[in-house]
Image (spheres, grey):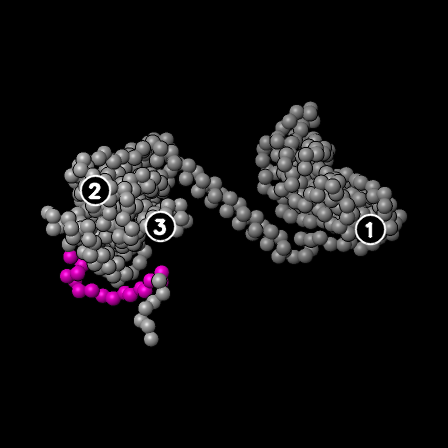
């Protein structure tokens, strides 16, 4: 049996030594005479250090924001079904008007749903409405189909009113994409919210620009909503696909972007 | 107010750098055997120290800088950015050491760096911390993130290797 071990494989032993080994002098003098002037560029070091500190702060902010997003998403998912959800509302007689159906089915007694914009689907003969309304501390938004062959149905989401909308300056939030394929496979709608004097929003996606008028959300006068119907060719799946979002006031001046 | 505090911190940091730069560069040179790399490591370590200066100013910033240097050297070595041959003698040092015109001071430095070239990276770090910084075994263990027994083993092996170094033996006889 060979006692050799494979080359490159280092055997690691750890054992205690007598105290005298520790104080054994080194055969070389590490404190050799050295007349060189060894200096570093302090200003460059400090500038680099400041950059590191800034990057750390940005990174910590991004991590915190991501954590808040994850917590928010988890909370929304775990909330009771009545306040969270994407759900199908039961069919109502076809003679019911769009607005009254929406008010009664979505906003409940005494509530009022605003139709942000509508779009006709030639294939199914239905009309899709992008809708929004206020439900207590929450804001709900989604799409509703009240006519045509698919009967009445709606898909909506409710969430706490974003704190950004409390800002005193005009604010435009990126639109959220609702791509409920059961309502309209080809054309997702993106619905966003604004606060302050914002009358029109212009969004840019995949090099195309789309404009949308802002309408007030009932029961929440300081909040407006806008909806953009994005053609399927632009393949929009999330808010991150929007590269530019610009808000205009009633005079047509840019207020945010 | 904040600007004034920043200025005070910057002043303290400058004093710290002025007081420790020669030691740290020499320590890094012992570790890397290359002044250029040593200066890079020290520069980077100081930047890290400055980035954390509010936390380090009342503690041991030099110890933190040493850890940055050791870790920076190890990472560099692991990533293969800077390949070295620890057991082969550097031609540069050999040439310089035998050149007649070389000064006595350079010859001594080159001899030390050449001898350290026969050690592994951890051995070099342990030896430099023990014999250049005069740290205790426990302090070295803390800085290198290993057990005290490992430090003793490492230093023991390094001493054995240095004793067997032929160049050192030759120079010892000559002197």
Q: Is residue B155 magenta?
A: no
Q: Could you confirm whether marks 1 and 3 are on the same chain?
A: no
Q: Identify the secondary structure beneath mark 1.
A: loop
In this rendered view, identify the residue nearer to me: A59 or A225.
A59
CA gap, disc 1 to disc 3?
67 Å
Mark 3 lies on residue: B74
Q: Which residue is mark 2?
A: B97
Q: Is residue B131 above or below residue A217?
A: below
- Label 3: few (<14), some (14–19) or many (≥20) C-alpha neighbours in 10 Å: some
Residue at 10% x, 47% y is: B175
User: Where residue B169 sits: x, y (%)?
Assistant: 16, 52
Front residue of this view, candidates B143 and B4? B143
- Residue drawn 36% across and 60% down? A8
Q: Is residue A209 left or right of residue B42?
A: right
> Which residue is outermost to the right?
A95
**In terms of sequence position, does the residue under pointer 3 or pointer 2 come before the other?**
3
Dot 1 and dot 3 residues touching (CB under 8 Å)? no
Spot occupied by residue A94 in the image (x, y as percentages of width and height)? 88, 50
Give the position of the C terminus of chain A as an image quadrant: top right
- Dots 3 and 2: beta carbons under 8 Å? no
Which residue is at a point 61% across and 34% down the rendered structure image?
A: A171
Q: Which residue is mark 1?
A: A152
Magenta part of the chain: A8-24
Q: Nearer the viewer, residue A42 or A131?
A: A42
The residue under the point 31% across, 33% down is: A42
Report, in whole angstroms, how far the alpha carbon at label 3 lies from the one at label 2: 27 Å
Chief SS of the magenta region: loop
Q: Secondary structure at mark 3?
A: helix
User: Do callouts 2 and 1 point to residues on the same chain?
Assistant: no
Q: Is residue B10 left or right of residue A73?
A: left
Q: SS for tag 2? A: helix
**Is residue A65 in view from this perspective?**
yes
């Amino acid at each position: 049996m060979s006692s050799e071990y494979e080359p490159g494989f280092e055997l690691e032993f750890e054992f205690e030594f007598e105290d005298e080994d520790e104080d054994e002098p080194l055969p070389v003098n590490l404190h050799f005479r050295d007349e060189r002037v060894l200096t570093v560029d302090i200003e460059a070091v400090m500038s680099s250090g400041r950059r590191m500190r800034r990057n750390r702060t940005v990174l910590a902010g991004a991590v915190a924001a991501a954590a808040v997003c994850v917590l928010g998403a988890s909370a929304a998912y775990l909330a009771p079904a009545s306040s969270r959800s994407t759900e199908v509302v039961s069919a109502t007689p076809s003679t019911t008007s769009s607005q009254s159906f929406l008010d009664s089915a979505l906003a409940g007694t005494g509530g009022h749903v605003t139709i942000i914009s509508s779009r006709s689907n030639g294939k199914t003969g239905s009309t899709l409405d992008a809708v929004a309304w206020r439900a207590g501390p929450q804001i709900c938004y989604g799409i509703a189909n009240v006519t045509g062959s698919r009967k009445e149905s709606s898909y909506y989401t409710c969430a706490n009113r974003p704190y950004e909308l409390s800002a005193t300056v005009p604010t435009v939030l990126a639109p959220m994409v609702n791509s409920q394929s059961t309502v309209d496979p080809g054309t997702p709608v993106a619905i966003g919210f604004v606060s302050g004097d914002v009358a029109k929003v212009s969004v840019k996606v995949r090099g195309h620009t789309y404009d949308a008028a802002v309408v007030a959300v009932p029961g929440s006068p300081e909040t407006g909503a806008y909806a953009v119907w994005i053609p399927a060719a632009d393949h929009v799946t999330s808010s991150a696909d929007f590269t530019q979002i610009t808000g205009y006031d009633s005079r047509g001046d840019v207020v945010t972007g | 107010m904040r600007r004034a505090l920043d200025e005070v911190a910057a002043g303290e940091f400058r004093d710290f750098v002025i007081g420790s730069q020669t030691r740290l560069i020499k320590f890094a040179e012992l570790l890397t055997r290359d002044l250029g790399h040593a200066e890079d490591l020290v520069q980077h370590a100081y930047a890290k120290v400055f980035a954390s200066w509010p936390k380090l100013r009342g503690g041991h910033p030099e110890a933190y800088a040493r850890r940055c240097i050791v870790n920076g050297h190890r990472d560099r070595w692991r990533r293969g950015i800077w390949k070295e041959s620890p057991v082969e003698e550097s031609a540069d040092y050999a040439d310089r050491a035998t050149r007649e015109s070389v000064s006595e001071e350079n010859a001594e430095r080159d001899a030390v760096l050449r001898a350290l070239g026969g050690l592994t990276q951890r051995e070099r770090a342990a030896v430099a911390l023990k014999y250049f910084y005069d740290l205790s075994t426990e302090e070295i263990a803390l800085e290198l993130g290993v057990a005290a027994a490992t430090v003793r083993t490492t230093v023991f092996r390094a001493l054995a290797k240095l004793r067997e170094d032929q160049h050192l033996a030759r120079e010892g006889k000559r002197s």
